[in-house]
Image (spheres, rainbow, N blue to C red):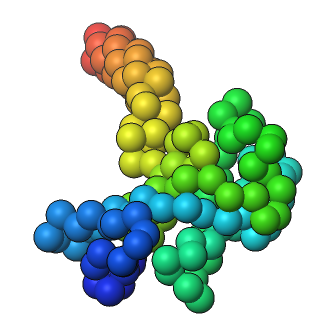
Amino acid sequence: MLSSTACQKAPGRSSPVSDGGDTCTYTGSATVTGVSQQTILCLTLTFPALPGQSFVATFPTDREPDASVLTPGANAPGVLWNGEVTEFAGVKSVQDPEYLPMNLAAAGWVMVVIGLGLAAWAVTLVRQAWRR
């Protein structure tokens, strides 16, 4: 989570917005300091307005930022929410809270269908056993 000092307006820089609670959103320029990619793209980012801190953003292979910002030293707009990079160069990261629920929706519906099928099968087995 960002410290309370990070949630205060920095003169001459993009101003973070705090909702007054435990969450904090910060929008500003981010610099890529590291890039790695195996199954997903991982970027290590720093924000000039938040010295001494680095943040990691991960992106699935079907949703990556433009290749021009995937080199160390590249700058692009970034968004921090609760200490997590939720957007970089206009692309939402895996840490974006709006991204995760839709990832799980399809799997949830599959589990519901499987569960209903198993329940119907169990009822059928109990009825057969009861008749014997």
Instruction: Identify the residue shown where x is 79% and y is 51%.
Output: 70
Q: Quadrant of residue 105?
A: top left
Which residue: 39% across, 41% down? 98
Looking at this view, name the residue that lies furthest to the front.
Answer: 12
Compared to residue 129, the image places residue 104 above or below, namely: below
Is 3 situated above or below 19?
below
From the top left corner, tell me how far across and down residue 97 is, in percent.
39, 48
Q: Left or right of 123: which side holds 111?
A: right
Q: Front-most of 11 and 116?
A: 11
Is residue 111 shown to the viewer in this render? no
Whether residue 93 sits left or right of residue 25 in the image: it is right
How many numbered markers are drawn? 0
Q: Please tell me which residue lies in front, 37 or 47.
A: 47
Q: Residue 39, position in %: x, y?
A: 80, 46
Q: Position of residue 28 (x, y in %)?
A: 48, 61
Where in the figure is residue 29, as x and y percent of width and height?
Answer: 55, 61
Q: Quadrant of the N terminus?
A: bottom left
Q: Is residue 90 above or below residue 54?
A: above
State the residue at coordinates (36%, 77%). Answer: 11
Decide which of 26, 105 is in the foreground and name it.
26
The quadrant in which the C terminus is found is top left
Relative height, residue 18 to residue 39 (above, below): below
